[in-house]
């Protein structure tokens, strides 16, 4: 049994370090990427407050396909370059969007989402997935969140 929980009130950098450590412990020795993504989506949802969606989109045949997540049902396929997730996958760059309604071409899978953070997951020089976090709060995410999720993506890239 796993009993992972964030430490209340700790600095954000330490919080993300704890999330990364928990993610590595949770996926240690498991070779099934989908199982690992499922547990990681749940873990992210436990560790990060004020989210209404947390999960993965996987790169499949040149487009993003919904992977394991926690939250309301979501868009199943996203073409590269479309929406926040498709932009992150196409550019290979983190997308930190403080107001999704101001993002050109935003794909609204959940009308409650107000801000979004999407981080590409790289393996062997290619984007293999994105980690997608949505919040109902405007400007929920900042550069520290982006850096923390980028470090998580790098740590788990060989396990998904």
Image (spheres, rainbow, N blue to C red):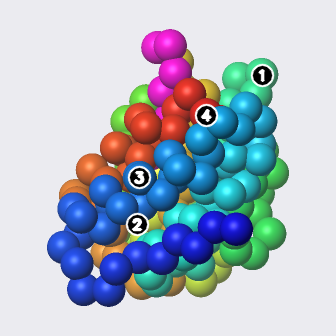
To which residue does mark 4 refer? 159
Viewer-closest of 79 and 159? 159
- Which secondary structure is most common in the magenta stretch? strand
What crowding class fits label 1: few (fewer than 14 Cα within 10 Å), some (14-19), or many (20 or more)? few
To which residue does mark 1 refer? 61
Question: Which quadrant of the figure contains the N terminus?
Answer: bottom right
Circle 1 — which element? loop
What crowding class fits label 2: few (fewer than 14 Cα within 10 Å), some (14-19), or many (20 or more)? few
Viewer-closest of 98 and 132? 132
To which residue does mark 2 refer? 102
The mark lying in front, picked from 4 and 2, is 4
All told, the count of numbered labels is 4
Q: Is residue 65 left or right of residue 127?
A: right
What distance separates the C-alpha of mark 4 from that of mark 3?
13 Å
Q: Is residue 104 left or right of residue 15?
A: right
Q: Quadrant of residue 34?
A: top right
Is residue 130 visible to the viewer in this orientation of the structure?
yes
What crowding class fits label 3: few (fewer than 14 Cα within 10 Å), some (14-19), or many (20 or more)? many
To which residue does mark 3 refer? 20
Q: Residue furthest front?
A: 1
Q: What segment carries the magenta color?
A: 119-125
- Do the residues bearing badges 1 and 2 touch, measured as CB atoms within 8 Å? no
What distance separates the C-alpha of mark 1 from that of mark 2?
29 Å
């Amino acid at each position: 049994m796993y009993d992972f929980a964030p430490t209340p009130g700790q600095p954000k950098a330490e919080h993300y370090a704890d999330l990364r450590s928990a993610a590595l412990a949770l996926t240690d020795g498991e070779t099934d990427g989908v199982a690992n993504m499922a547990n990681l989506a749940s873990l992210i949802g436990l560790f990060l407050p004020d989210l209404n969606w947390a999960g993965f989109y996987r790169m499949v045949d040149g487009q993003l396909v919904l992977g394991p997540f926690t939250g309301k049902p979501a868009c199943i396929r996203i073409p590269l370059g479309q929406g926040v997730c498709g932009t992150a996958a196409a550019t290979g760059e983190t997308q930190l969007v403080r107001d999704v309604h101001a993002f050109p071409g935003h794909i609204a899978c959940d009308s409650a989402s107000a801000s979004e953070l999407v981080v590409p997951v790289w393996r062997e020089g290619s984007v293999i997935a994105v980690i997608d976090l949505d919040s109902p709060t405007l400007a929920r995410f900042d550069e520290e969140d982006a850096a923390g999720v980028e470090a998580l993506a790098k740590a788990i890239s060989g396990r998904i």
